[in-house]
Image: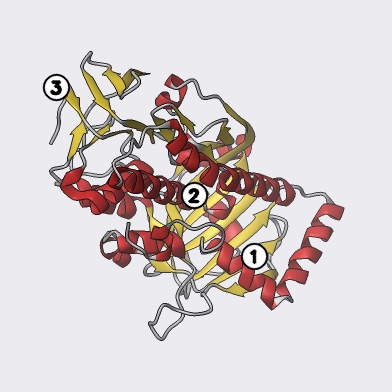
């Protein structure tokens, strides 16, 4: 249902129909049903055709468990590719052979009663994930879409947050959640500042078809211009995600398809046989940012609105889903005992739960990018020695798999397949 003018009262208002915004709505609706009223305000009205998005995400096992518990995974699974193995190389762009310095099996030690090993991660096309999230909430009578709509301002009245939209209409709720992405207008409206920096790199994403099977292997080539990832997709296809220095990225993006494919072939280095383009190319500047606070009175941030990390490990969407699982757990538990979900003390629990983990992850991904984008001979020798050392330490590799699976630390219940 679309609405652009009525003044109404909701329990929760979500600014932005992002992955995080849609997942948060689905989580609350799954737990509370017709006991809650939610509004999603978004600038874009849907036409039935998803917007072009060449990205694919390395979805962690923890995030997959959350989606499965919410009944969403069944609509994603056919488009998802389990990752069976991960290979890491470190070489110059001109190297004809890229020796594998670190390789590890990407399965958890014990599956959940299935009799087979559970993948620690899955490669999921962004469009498949977004469509599944949207379908999961689109017809729910407890959810109202206000589209096209945009929040102009909001004020804490003490008992609610009063929200004024660009068209002049007003709505109110116990809690407003900012989930618009990196350029969050609601974050700015709450007066929350960010810290961060540009990398001087551009992310390039496209999809290829290839002659040889990938066998579920994901590859991370560390090249001087930045990391180059080969993410397997169902069939003989892969999503390529790589970082380049800005001027070099402009040169590559300006090439025709033949020239662009030649650049890809140089980086893939023959491992997949004959290649062809199987999707559009997209690009955006890379930056890191962290919100100085995740909450304000009757306001909370989710996903990229709270933290934007380098895509080197493909963990951005997983951090967002951990935010969703944590905030929804707190909100649901609070509402069930009849308390106010917009209370700053309640929201402070969410900030304490998620801010340190997000900051630590952002710092780790930033450090990895800086380390592996450095082509100095001594630096390369040291990091290659380190990768080789890790390759000979099975216990450490199992730890890496658990971390990438999103199954360490203080887990929200949804990441443990527990319903709220």
**Residue 370, picture quadrant:** top right
Quarter of the image that includes the N terminus: top left
Which sits in the foreground, 288 or 415? 415
- Tell me the residue that label 2 is attached to: 319
Say left or right for 311 vs 341.
right
Residue 254 seen anywhere in this rendered image of the structure:
no
Vertical order, 97 against 336 (above or below): below
Residue drawn at the location 35% of the way across and 44% of the way down: 334
Residue 55 vs 289, above or below: the answer is below
The label shown at residue 88 is 1
Q: Is residue 78 above or below residue 289?
A: below
Q: Mark 2 vs mark 1: give the one in front.
A: 2
Residue 398 appears left or right of 297 = right
Helix, strand or loop status at disc 1: strand
The CA span between labels 1 and 3 is 54 Å
Please identify the quadrant where the C terminus is shown.
bottom left
State how far apart marks 3 and 2 are (Cα): 34 Å
Of residue 354 and residue 195, the one placed in the foreground of this image is: 354
Numbered disc in front, either 1 or 3 = 3
Residue 402 placement: quadrant: bottom right
342 horizontally vs 169: left or right: right
- For marks 3 and 2 on the same chain, the one whose residue lies earlier in the sequence: 3
Q: Secondary structure at mark 2?
A: helix
Circle 3: element type: loop
Rendering coords of residue 260 (x, y %) = 51, 48
* Distance CA(mark 2)–CA(mark 1): 22 Å
């Amino acid at each position: 249902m679309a609405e652009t003018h009525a003044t109404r009262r909701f329990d929760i208002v979500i600014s932005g129909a992002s992955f995080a915004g849609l997942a948060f709505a689905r989580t609350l609706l799954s737990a509370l049903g017709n006991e809650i009223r939610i509004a999603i305000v978004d600038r874009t009205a849907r036409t039935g055709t998803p917007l072009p998005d060449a990205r694919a995400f390395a979805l962690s096992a923890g995030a997959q468990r959350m989606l499965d518990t919410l009944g969403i995974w069944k609509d994603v699974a056919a488009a998802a590719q389990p990752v069976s193995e991960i290979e890491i190389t470190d070489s110059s762009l001109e190297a004809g052979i890229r020796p594998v310095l670190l390789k590890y099996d990407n399965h958890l030690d014990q599956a959940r009663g299935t009799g087979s090993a559970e993948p620690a991660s899955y490669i999921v096309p962004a469009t498949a994930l977004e469509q599944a999230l949207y379908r999961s909430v689109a017809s729910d009578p407890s959810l109202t879409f206000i589209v096209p709509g945009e929040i102009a301002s909001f004020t804490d009245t003490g008992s609610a947050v009063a929200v004024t939209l660009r068209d002049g209409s007003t709505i109110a709720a116990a809690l407003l959640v900012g989930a618009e992405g990196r350029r969050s207008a609601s974050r700015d409206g709450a007066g929350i500042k960010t810290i961060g920096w540009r990398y001087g790199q551009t992310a390039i994403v496209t999809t290829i078809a290839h002659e040889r099977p990938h066998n579920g292997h994901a590859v991370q080539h560390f090249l001087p211009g930045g990391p180059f990832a080969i993410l397997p997709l169902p069939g003989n296809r892969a999503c390529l995600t790589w970082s380049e220095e800005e001027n070099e990225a402009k040169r590559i993006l300006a090439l025709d398809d033949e020239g662009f494919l030649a650049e890809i072939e140089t980086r893939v280095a023959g491992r997949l046989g004959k290649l062809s383009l199987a999707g559009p190319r997209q690009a955006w500047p890379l930056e890191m940012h962290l919100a100085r606070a995740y909450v304000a009175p009757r306001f909370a941030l989710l996903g990229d609105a709270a933290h934007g990390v380098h895509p080197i490990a493909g963990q951005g969407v997983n951090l967002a889903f951990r935010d969703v699982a944590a905030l929804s757990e707190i909100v649901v538990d609070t509402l069930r005992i009849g308390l106010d979900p917009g209370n700053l003390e309640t929201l402070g629990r969410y900030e304490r739960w998620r801010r340190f983990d997000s900051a630590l992850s952002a710092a780790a991904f930033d450090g990895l990018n800086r380390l592996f984008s450095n082509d100095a001979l001594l630096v390369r020798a040291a990091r290659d020695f380190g990768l080789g050392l890790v390759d000979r330490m099975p216990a450490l590799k199992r730890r890496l798999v658990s971390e990438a699976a999103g199954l360490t630390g203080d887990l929200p219940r949804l990441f443990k397949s527990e319903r709220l």
